[in-house]
């Protein structure tokens, strides 16, 4: 990278690799699995094509991600995190948890992957004690498998095998459901166990803001 911190501290060395604008958000968009360039653009609408291309190149050179080719029927190149990139996940989760209590200065909507991250960082494990279930979440057409077992939440990209309930809606509507207490109305299609969906949306308490 062109600019680096002249500092041997491990934190400075990490920021040399992932501290530039959009870098960690690219990692966020790949946590649930590979994405094509167009999908990354959709998840990061504020990043220009040239900026995103630059960040992807830099992160590939740093060994954080790699390009992969998917054969038929997809027949397209995509980006995925390497093992080194996946090692950023705990730090990214803690940063997201810390940042969720900061003053909100935007009305922009969350991407599907950002919303999945928000679910992971706000999940109320004690409130889910004894719950074991699987949900298929289809948000803006993107399928996610959501599973709770042993007081832990797991979210992966792709279809959920034999879900107890399926929810299909927009990312914005799902965000309103879990963080603003919006009702399950006509903007949300539910099949399967509706009571389990009602239980799920109560497990993500909105973080209290940091005191000024």
Image (cartoon, rainbow, N blue to C red):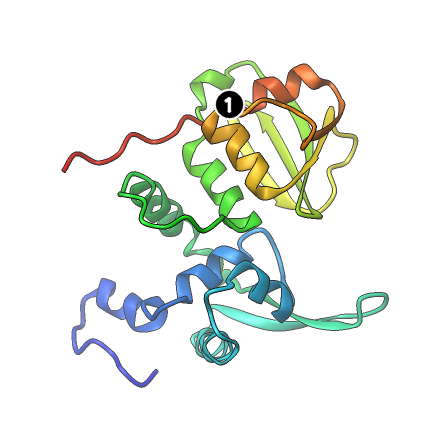
Disc 1 secondary structure class: loop
Image side of residue 16 versus residue 151, left or right: left
| Quadrant of the rendering where the C terminus is positioned | top left
The percent coordinates of residue 23 (x first, y second) are 41, 67
Spot the residue most to the right. Answer: 73
Residue 1 appears in the rendering: yes
**Residue sitting at x 66%, y 23%:** 133
> From the viewer's perspective, is 207 left or right of 25?
left
* Front one among 187 and 118: 187
Instruction: Look at the picture and state if 164 lies above or below 2.
Output: above
Q: Can you give x and y, in whole percent of width and height, for residue 41 in the image?
A: 56, 66
Using residue 158 as the reference point, say whether residue 149 is left or right of it.
left
> Percent x, y for residue 51?
45, 77
The residue to which callout 1 is attached is 151
The quarter of the picture where the N terminus appears is bottom left
Left/right of residue 139 with respect to residue 18 in the rendered view: right
151 shown above or below 102: above
């Amino acid at each position: 990278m062109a600019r680096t911190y002249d500092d041997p501290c491990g934190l400075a060395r990490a920021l040399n690799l992932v501290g530039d604008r959009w870098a960690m958000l690219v990692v966020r968009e790949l946590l649930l699995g590979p994405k094509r360039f167009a999908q990354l653009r959709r998840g990061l609408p504020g990043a220009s094509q040239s900026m995103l291309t630059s960040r992807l190149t830099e992160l590939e050179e740093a060994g954080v991600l790699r390009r992969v080719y998917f054969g038929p029927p997809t027949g397209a190149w995509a980006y995925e995190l390497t093992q080194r990139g996946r090692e950023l996940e705990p730090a990214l989760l803690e940063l997201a948890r810390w940042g969720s209590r900061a003053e909100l200065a935007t009305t922009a909507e969350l991407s599907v992957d950002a919303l999945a991250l928000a679910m992971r960082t706000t999940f109320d494990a004690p409130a889910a004690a004894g719950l074991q279930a699987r949900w298929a979440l289809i948000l803006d057409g993107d399928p996610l498998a959501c599973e709770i077992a042993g007081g832990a939440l797991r979210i992966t990209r792709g279809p959920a095998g034999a879900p107890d309930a399926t929810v299909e809606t927009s990312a914005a509507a799902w965000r309103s459901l879990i963080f603003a207490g919006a009702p399950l109305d006509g903007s949300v299609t539910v099949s399967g166990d509706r009571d389990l969906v009602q239980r799920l949306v109560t497990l993500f308490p909105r973080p209290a803001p940091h005191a000024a």
